[in-house]
Image (cartoon, grey):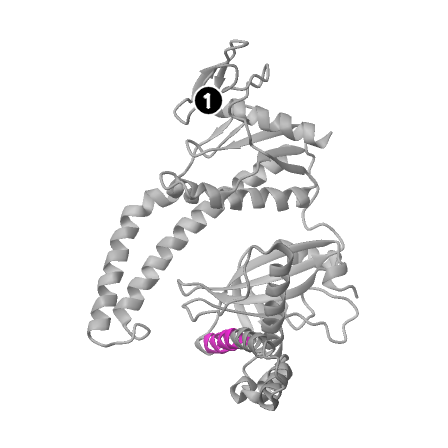
Amino acid sequence: MLSMAKLDYHYRLKIRIYPSDRQKQIIKVNSDASRFIYNQMVASNRELYQLKRVKLPVELVQNRIQQLEDRQNAKQLSNHYQFLADPRIDSLTKANAIQNYRKAWQAFHQVHTAGVPNFHRKSYAWKYQTNCQYLGQKSAQMTNGTVRFLDAKHVEVPKLGRLRINGAHQRLLKRDATQAIRIGTVTIAKDAADRFFLSMQLGSKKPFVEPVLIPHQAVGIDLNTENFLTTSDGDVIANPRYYRTIKAKLAREQRKLSRRQMRAKKEHRSLWTAKNYQQQRQLVAKLHDQVRRQRQHFLQQLSTTLIKSHDLVVAEELRSKNLLRNHALAMSIADVGWRTFLGMLSYKADLYGVTFVTVNPKNTTQTCSQCRFVMGTQGTKKLTLADRRWQCPRCGTQHVRDHNAARNILAKGQTQLV
């Protein structure tokens, strides 16, 4: 039986679950345990760092260092903190919390952008991880592990038992009989709107999607705030602006939430037990989630269409963090979700066997796609954001700003692949 790392293809499945009140309590206990263990690892290692800086061989310091080093595994933590021995807590929840802490350090050492591991604060969102194990099984499938599908509407999870589910998993269940899909890491989560989800890491020796006949056609993509994107073929996709559409309603509901928060604090009531506050908090969370789901659906549909219709997709590299420093455009840039869209294009290109590259967008807007003349040179002025159409001073070609940029992006990508 091959491990997840040795399987050629990987896939992520996220489905909605509907736990009972008892199961919700178990999810809460495991989420709290996961957060506690992670925070203990952060605190212990910070203390170890400070203690090891003490050069004097003080016996008290050395004993404390030994105690902290002994608590670097789940068994020792459970022995020291008795509440972690609760039978409702999955043993793999503890192991995954420690593993996630170590992975956070690995990510920091490799890329230095995520920052060092910090404490996880308590919130209305819950999450913990477990793993699907195949004890005594000759082959790994979606129906014979410790986490398994009982039928099209139910799944079984350790400690939780039988859960009612809803999602796009039936296609995979039909293929599991012949494809032998293995379940790896499993995440159980609750969002701020009090909805529960189960995410699975799947692995297989065969592709998860059927091969499609992709035409030999290339496309360049120019992302902009005037519209969502313009392709080198001249197609323009409008920017739906989901957040701006709901912004006024969201502001009203957030003001109401703030008033209820102030009232609860004035009456010395805990926000966790203030029913009016909690009711309004869920309403605000659902409005935020509505915008997220609308944007996600739009990006998923558009990225799939582009990938399935072309064998080469070229887009511009974006530094969203730098772009967001422009306060005049920050809201529009955050609303479109460019980074999410490029991430979707990247993983879907791998999924469907399509080539996807990103190029440096320098001068793609200022360069004529016909004669390669660059605006801002030879005594000409650079184009501004207000210049949506312009004429090349050398060859006289009339350009639509975004269409011209998309053609230049495609040409850069084709040159990069040569």
Above or below for 238 versus 158: above
Residue at x 40%, y 49% (from the top left corner): 291
Mark 1 — residue? 382
Above or below for 387 versus 39: above
Above or below for 289 versus 62: above
The quadrant of the rendering that contains the C terminus is top right
Magenta residues, dominant SS class = helix
Residue at x 64%, y 32% (from the top left corner): 310
Residue at x 53%, y 43% (from the top left corner): 341
User: Dot 1, how many residues are within 10 Å of its Cα: few (below 14), some (14-19), or many (20+)?
Assistant: some
Residue 152 locus on image (x, y percent): 59, 62
Residue 262 locus on image (x, y percent): 22, 67
33 drawn magenta: yes
The range drawn in magenta is 23-37
Q: Along the horizontal axis of the image, is 354 left or right of 160?
A: right
The quadrant of the rendering that contains the N terminus is bottom right
The quadrant holding residue 335 is top left
The foreground one among 290 and 244 is 244
